[in-house]
């Protein structure tokens, strides 16, 4: 009897491990995009978890396509083979901005995937009805697709159904709104630069907002400045617990994903002459598309700009996104 109980317990434990271990796996979805491995040389490691100390489960060749499922911090969760998933560092993957998810729209049977754009090309695979793939490009009635993680082939475009609309839920983070011109701290000097929060302190003020939100208590810009380091010119050295990206590909999508994680995003942009400014993106009003006008901001420099579209009208050149890890 004890032996039977032991066997049952072992089986249940094994099933629990399988179930919980498999929760993260997910096939390509309507939110999937394509990425290109952009290593300087050699292959890109795919790891079991979001850590460089995690075991390597696969490798991807430089220049190859891969299906990207979701991004968290500086790691992409991806499908590297049919039904196999892992994580790769985002610094070595370039998203294909023109790519779009589509589902197989057929009445019955399976859809042939061919080696080239035409029925005369060899059949290299097949797709079931409803299967999601990523369309890389379209030409003359044929779609070049990414399927089963890393495979590339061609299908007739008439059987590809793209998402007509994506409904994005509203997000609102209760981030405090500070202005660098506030008389309580406007004339505080930043480091040894001789420059003040009023003149160049938009990043310091933005960090005071995000840190107040992260920690759950008030940190005003003058107190924030004492926790930070600056160059002789007053440039801020970002805290080590903040992630910084200069990748402007689909940056509105990036911002939305971070907001969904409950984190405000500091965004920097420039004028065409090179002048830069920073704001804190605090939410999204909701809608069927990621319009800049629907992103809510706290602008350290003025109360007159309340959405990202207004900010980008004044500073049209994307620079950086910064948010805590």
Image: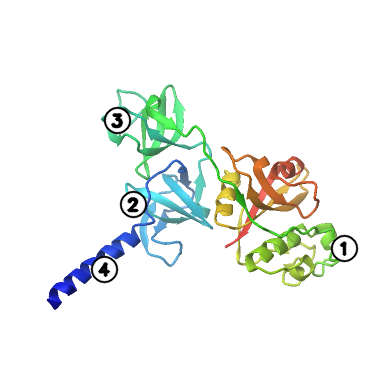
The residue to which callout 3 is attached is 112
Tag 4 or tag 1, which sits nearer the N-term?
4
Q: Is residue 129 above or below residue 261?
A: above
Between the C-alphas of marks 2 and 1, the distance is: 56 Å
Between the C-alphas of marks 3 and 2, the distance is: 22 Å
The residue to which callout 4 is attached is 13
Tag 2 or tag 3, which sits nearer the N-term?
2
Between the C-alphas of marks 2 and 4, the distance is: 23 Å
Q: Which element type, helix, strand or loop, lies under badge 3? A: strand
Q: Tell which tag, 2 or 4, sits nearer the viewer.
A: 4
Q: Which element type, helix, strand or loop, lies under badge 1? A: loop
The residue to which callout 2 is attached is 84
Q: Is residue 271 left or right of residue 161?
A: right
Name the quadrant of the N terminus: bottom left
Q: Is residue 20 above or below residue 227?
A: above
Q: Which element type, helix, strand or loop, lies under badge 2? A: strand
Determine the residue positioned at 60% across, 66% down.
Answer: 241
Is residue 176 visible in the rendered image? The answer is yes
Q: Are marks 2 and 1 in contact (CB under 8 Å)?
A: no
Q: Are marks 3 and 2 in contact (CB under 8 Å)?
A: no
The residue to which callout 1 is attached is 183
Q: Is residue 193 left or right of residue 228?
A: right
Tag 4 or tag 2, which sits nearer the N-term?
4
Determine the residue positioned at 57% across, 54% down.
Answer: 258
Name the quadrant of the C terminus: bottom right
Q: Is residue 72 above or below residue 250?
A: below
Between the C-alphas of marks 1 and 4, the distance is: 62 Å
Is residue 246 visible in the rendered image? The answer is no
């Amino acid at each position: 009897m004890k032996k039977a109980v032991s066997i049952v317990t072992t089986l249940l434990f094994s099933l629990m491990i399988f179930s919980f271990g498999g929760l993260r796996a997910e096939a390509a979805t309507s939110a999937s995009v394509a990425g290109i491995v952009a290593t300087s040389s050699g292959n890109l490691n795919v790891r079991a978890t979001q850590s460089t100390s995690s075991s390597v489960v696969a490798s991807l060749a430089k220049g190859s396509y891969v299906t990207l499922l979701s991004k968290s911090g500086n790691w992409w969760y991806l499908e590297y083979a049919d039904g196999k998933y892992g994580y790769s560092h985002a610094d070595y993957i370039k998203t294909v901005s023109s790519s779009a998810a589509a589902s197989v729209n057929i009445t019955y049977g399976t859809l042939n995937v061919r080696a080239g754009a035409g029925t005369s090309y060899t059949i290299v695979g097949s797709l079931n009805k409803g299967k999601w793939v990523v369309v890389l490009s379209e030409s003359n009635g044929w779609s070049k697709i990414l399927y089963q993680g890393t495979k590339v082939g061609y299908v007739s475009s008439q059987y590809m159904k793209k998402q007509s609309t994506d409904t994005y839920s509203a997000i609102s983070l209760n981030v405090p709104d500070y202005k660098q011109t506030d008389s309580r701290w406007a004339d505080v000097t930043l480091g040894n630069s001789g420059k003040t929060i009023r003149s160049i302190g938009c990043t310091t003020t933005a960090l005071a907002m995000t840190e107040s939100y992260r920690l759950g208590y008030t940190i005003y810009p003058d107190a924030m400045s004492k926790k930070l380091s600056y160059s002789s010119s007053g440039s801020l050295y970002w805290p080590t617990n903040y992630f910084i990206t200069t990748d402007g590909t689909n940056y509105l999508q990036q911002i939305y994903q971070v907001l969904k994680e409950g984190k405000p995003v500091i965004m920097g942009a420039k004028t065409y002459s090179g002048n830069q400014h920073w704001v804190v993106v605090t939410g999204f009003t909701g809608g069927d598309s990621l319009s800049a006008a629907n992103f809510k901001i706290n602008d350290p420099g003025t109360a007159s700009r309340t959405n990202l579209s207004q900010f980008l009208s004044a500073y049209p050149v994307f620079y950086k996104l910064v948010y805590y890890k």
